[in-house]
Image (cartoon, grey):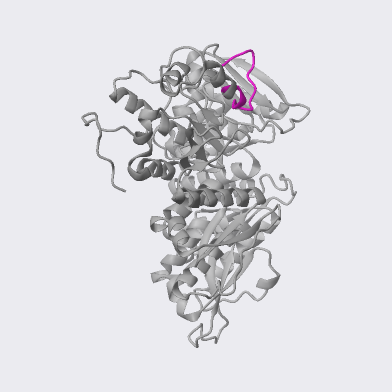
Amino acid sequence: LKLHKFCGPRTLLPSSLRHQIMGRSRSDSRRRDRRSRSATPEKNGRKDSRSPSRGKDEDKKNPEDYGVDTMKITDDDAAFILGKGGKTKEKISRVSEAEIELFERDLILEIRGTKLQRRRAKKYAEGVMAQRTGPVSITEDYDDGDLTMLLVPQVAVGFVTGRAGNFLRTIEEEWCTLMFFCEVGSGGRDKEYEKLAIFGDVRARRGAELKVLSAVETKVPGYFDKIRDEVVPRDKGKDSTGTWGTDTMTFQDDELSYALGKQGGTRKKLERSTGAVVQYVGHVALFSGTREERKRAKDYMKWLFEQLEGPVFVESWADRNDCTVVEVPSDCIGYITGARRAALGAMEEEWGVLMFFMNRKGDRGGRGGESEKLIIFGSERARRGAELKVMSGVETKSPGTFTRGLREKISNERGFDTDRIIFKDDELSYALGKQGSTRKKLEGAAGAILQYVGHVAFIAGTLKERKRCHEFVKWLLAQRRGSVTIPDVSNRDDATEMHIPENCKGWVTGNRGSELRRMEEETQTYMFMALDDRGDERLIIFSHNPGSKSDPHGRAAAERLVNEMVQEKLRDDGRGRYDSRSPSRGRGGGRRDSRSPPPRRSRRDSRSRTPPRRRR
């Protein structure tokens, strides 16, 4: 089985095919490929890795205890470690914070990281492999400050596990944990209870634990009361601030449904806006986090319930560091709120904030022609995103409210700040795209917040994010006038360069760029054909997210989609099999790894030489 890496900034066709199509010399292509290799070093000349699970910047200094460990495994173990589409290997890497590579030729698992990271990764890998032959045995030395053991009633084990383990896998994905049922020491399993091991950091373990307890309480009502004194004080003070803990609040039946919200929407909103772990186990709400996070969660919950009784006004809002207030004109309030609060709810869900209009008792609430204060709670980035979305809506309804007299602004602040660009009429419509698709594309690829308020583009983020977004907007507008020249991207950490065969370019780009737009939307990237310093055209994929073998988003995912399209075209043209690897990606045959995920899409087999394009 041979796989190639998706970690380098360039992707080239095989040298033999490149000679046919582009007339480049072998030495030239090798020099270019050497410059563009991944910063992750190869060991012992191995080049048949199934793909590195993490990447590190070359200029980052490693800790003193940084090192490399290896594990010899069997072929069956390799299948378990890799998992479907490489997800298990990625999960072990994320939870342990180590870099993991699986070399299928030598059946060796290579682990890079600090001593603690390597120890944890090895422990997790052994636990995953042990599940092949039966229950995992946990000994006392398994706990490196990363383990929570939870007793689950036998009658609820199947419910917690889910079909084929799907419910546990969902919790692992949500909270970045590793979970499995196990035996402790040399003793056999208890007949009444099963022990569930949860590995991860303190916040992740707590989130996963409470999610499991919520499910258990549904199946076995009253179980939480039996273990409450053990669960609530768990891991107290065991975080970087030393203030980690858990607070509780008990609800009545009618209060619980309101605090939960439709499909748990209110609970999720509170969790995202406060930064705390918010979970309901039976009628008990548990807030886990730092002291500040728990206080925010209780404040927000109090204001939610106060809204049932009448208007709410947060007297100390100006002194708080977790809120932003926007003045909304009275004639725009209904537009911003939406029918049955649908518009506000959509913004809360998009940005992970809590929003409501503030009024004192006796106020007319904007009916006297005055503006109303809309308060937004959440992190700085989330608040800014929601605020700009509100400003955009108000500006649409009442032009000039926020942009009258506004000028362009470029900030040199390295941290979070906001820049402004003023568009001309024709530039705005082009930069917005159909239903805002172009704006969303640039925003997602840059990792910044990009919002248009009237003719003004607001770009919010760190200095690096803002600069990247500025460049993307500049290149986008330049494409209206013709080809864009980007001489060199080898020093960028947000670009992947691909040389497309001449007879495949139209197939890959699609009618008026429709196929590129489709791939951009699927992978949240920004891609276009650009000229290099020699005037040669190549495809560049931009995104702050490098992606991975199992990630459906990012540059690696876009690269896979492009390779699939090129392969289809070459097969249709009778060119035979197409190997999408660059020369540096390994030797040997081009067979696809049977464990890798199948192609995301395929076109009709019965098609003409020039098939019809999809309508967008």
Residue 306's place in the image compared with 188, above or below, is below
Residue 40 occupies quadrant: top right
In the visual, does 75 lie left or right of 249?
left
Q: Answer whether residue 41 is magenta in the image.
A: yes
Residue 367 position, x and y percent, is 48, 85
Residue 147 position, x and y percent, is 63, 35
In the visual, does 592 lie left or right of 130?
left
In the visual, does 571 lie left or right of 269?
left
Residue at image coords 54%, 86%: 363
Residue 609 position, x and y percent, is 24, 30
Residue 474's place in the image compared with 51, above or below, is below
Residue 198 position, x and y percent, is 58, 36
Residue 101's place in the image compared with 293, above or below, is above
Instruction: State whether residue 434 appears in this view.
Output: yes
Identify which residue, 330 or 45, lies in the foreground. Answer: 45
Identify which residue, 363 or 222, lies in the foreground. Answer: 363
Identify which residue, 19 or 182, lies in the foreground. Answer: 19
Q: What is the count of numbered marks? A: 0
Residue at image coords 44%, 39%: 167
Residue at image coords 68%, 72%: 318
Name the image quarter holding the N terminus.
Answer: top left
Where are the magenta residues, as a range? 33-47
In the visual, does 400 lie left or right of 521?
right
Identify which residue, 279 or 406, lies in the foreground. Answer: 406
Instruction: State whether residue 257 appears in this view.
Output: no
Q: Answer whether residue 31 is magenta in the image.
A: no
Q: Main secondary structure of the magenta part?
A: loop
